Image: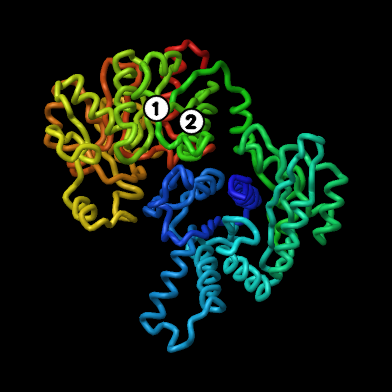
Amino acid sequence: MSGLGKGITAASTGLLLKARGVRVTNLKIDMYLNVDAGTIRPAEHGEVFVLQDGMECDEDLGHYERFLNESLRKENYMTTGQVYKTVIDKERSFGYNGEDVEAIPHVTDEIIERIIRAGTVNKAEVVIIELGGTVGEYQNGLFFEASRILKLKKPKDVVQVHVSYLPVIRSIGELKSKPVQQSVRVLNSMGIQPDLLVARSEVLIDQRRRERLALFCNMQNEDIITNPDLESIYDVPLFLEKQNYSARLLKKLGLRGKKINLNLWKKFVKNLEKRKGEVKIGMVGKYFATGNFVLKDAYLCVIEAIRQASAAAGVKVKVECISAEDLEKKEVKDVLAGFQGIIVPQGWGSRGVEGKITAVKYARENKIPYLGLCFGMQMAVIEFARNVLGMNGANSEEVDPKTKYPVIHVMPDQREYLEKHQYGGTIRLGDWPCSIKRGTKLAEIYSEDRHASLAMTIEERHRHRYEFNGEFREKFEKAGMVISGTSPDGKLVEAIELKNHPFFVATQFHPEYKSRPLDPHPIFVEFLKAVARLQKVSL
């Protein structure tokens, strides 16, 4: 089932094998007919992650990059839509030489070809493939069939790892293994026998359950790996390795690895444990609600970037999700009082905009550290225009196409896409260069960081259509807003900040996409340090 931990298990597998000197890469397969994840609602699917080449993909790719500490590419993401589109396009161009084009072998061959390509372009010895969805679902059957065929053709080169759930029946306090047994039987009916079983549960599985799983799932006891709920996702690889997980994998693959070296990872985890004090950060967004539940996955990259930065800053952080729409209905003091830092992350459309602008104003006027990310920068620009420059009704063309002061507007080439309703893959995506103005807070943040060149040029990832309107730039700068980052030609505004404020930085790019446990993003680190200094938290 979704949210079980397949992505973290796959990411941990990559980290552990890499720590043994094996060249690895991770591949995520989503069963959707979408060509990419770009047009899926965040509340439906969780946050969309963007790779450096601009591929909009599943959040699991973010976990892979964080655990592997390296950037991946479009070949590391596959959807049913991509596969079908390629097969159909190939058939239309007579690529199958007049054959009847069928699910097997043509679709399964395309799947296998993409798996092999992911390994080739990443120069990997091992490709770790995560199949999304649930065993037995109709829509993922072809991917399981491709997996069966691949194992049939290369039995010594393929290891099947099954991640499954053991629920605890609270009324009787018992851990149940029967659901796992049944899911393995469904796999067996597809011709797939798991080589390793990762047993997800709230608690450790005991020896009795391990023996039952081994017996009924046709496996050895040592091939049952327990993976209970832990304090942090970053504890998972260390917990798996205590059970000789990577050694079991290498043995089954017939590979030799070096002695494992997890020193840097252990240091990071130790730094998380050593954090002092606590600061309270309010994140004002609009993708939290899903039915009667609160979904944090829509802003997962931001939350993880904060957690990683907290280890570097040495301060504990409590992040609370605040509905932007609530801010439109309630007194801002009643909602934001008590928060020592405010973040406004990404977003789309008009819903909740006024609440976000209210949050920006509260942070600016009350000298509360503020970090704006993409949409959060645009909201900061609108708030400044209205309340400092006196441009009543200033807005983004996305929210109000008829605004008198379109301080955020759509670029001409983007307008053409909108008129044609071409939304998927048409926005500014992936890595883009940014020139940082010397003497600014942004320059100070990047100056000691390896991401910035001597010329103060960085590359950060983007995902947006609307931009700062350059026609108003001079008025903003005269009123005290600092344009601290632009495109190299100076035409596009990439970052803004305010003087005489403890920390007020907003970026059009997404620094959270590049933040990693072993390389936390300096913007998040400095934001937390600013919050901690104001609260006199010992660093």
Q: Which of the marked residues, 1 or 2, is nearer the chain's N terminus?
A: 2
Q: Position of residue 261 (x, y in %)?
A: 66, 44
Question: Mark 1 falls on what kind of element?
Answer: strand
Labelled disc at residue 306 = 2
Q: Is residue 438 above or below residue 184?
A: above
Residues at marks 1 and 2, CA–CA distance in whole angstroms: 11 Å
Tell me, yes or no, whether the two marked residues, 1 and 2, touch with CB atoms within 8 Å: yes
Q: Is residue 121 above or below residue 388?
A: below
Q: Position of residue 473 (x, y in %)?
A: 15, 32
Question: Mark 2 falls on what kind of element?
Answer: helix
Q: Position of residue 58 (x, y in %)?
A: 48, 51
- Specify whether 416 is left or right of 189: left
Label 1 belongs to which residue?
A: 343
Q: Amino acid at mark 2?
A: Ile
Badge 1: few (under 14), some or many (20 or more) residues near its Cα, within 10 Å?
many
Q: Amino acid at mark 1?
A: Ile
Residue 156 shows in the view:
no
- Specify whether 403 is left or right of 519: left
